[in-house]
Image (tube, rainbow, N blue to C red):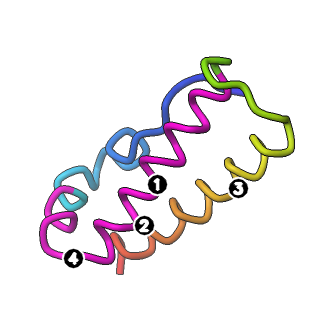
Amino acid sequence: MSHTPHELHEEFPDLAEKISEMKQSDAHFARLADEYHEINRRVHRAETLVSPVEELTEVEMRKQRAVLKDEIYRMLTA
């Protein structure tokens, strides 16, 4: 398990400029990016024990983050 934050611009460095553009021009994308940021922050806080949660809760949050990341990537590469 990594305790490294998974920020979108770090996950997709080659698409960082497009992420910024789409946040400004696509409300749906911006909402997904905000949701990703929020769940990513919660996962990171759980992993680093700043805000510990039950293991199953942490696993579910990671799954939710992965679903959002997949959808964001799909939109970025469409």
Q: Is residue 11 above or below residue 46?
A: below
Residue 71: percent from left, percent from top: 49, 71
Q: Amino acid at mark 3?
A: Lys
**Residues under numbered marks 1 and 4 in contact, where contact means CB atoms less than 8 Å apart:** no
| Left or right, 14 with reference to 17 | right
Q: Nearer the viewer, residue 21 or 47?
A: 47
Q: Nearer the viewer, residue 52 or 78?
A: 52
Query: Which region shows up in magenta?
Result: 20-47
Q: Is residue 25 above or below residue 51?
A: below
Q: Quadrant of residue 49?
A: top right
Q: Is residue 10 above or below residue 14?
A: above
Residue behind mark 3: 63
Residue behind mark 2: 72
User: Disc 4 on helix, strand or loop?
Assistant: loop
Instruction: Mark 2: give few (<14), some (14-19) or many (20+) Cα within 10 Å.
Output: many
User: Disc 3 on helix, strand or loop?
Assistant: helix
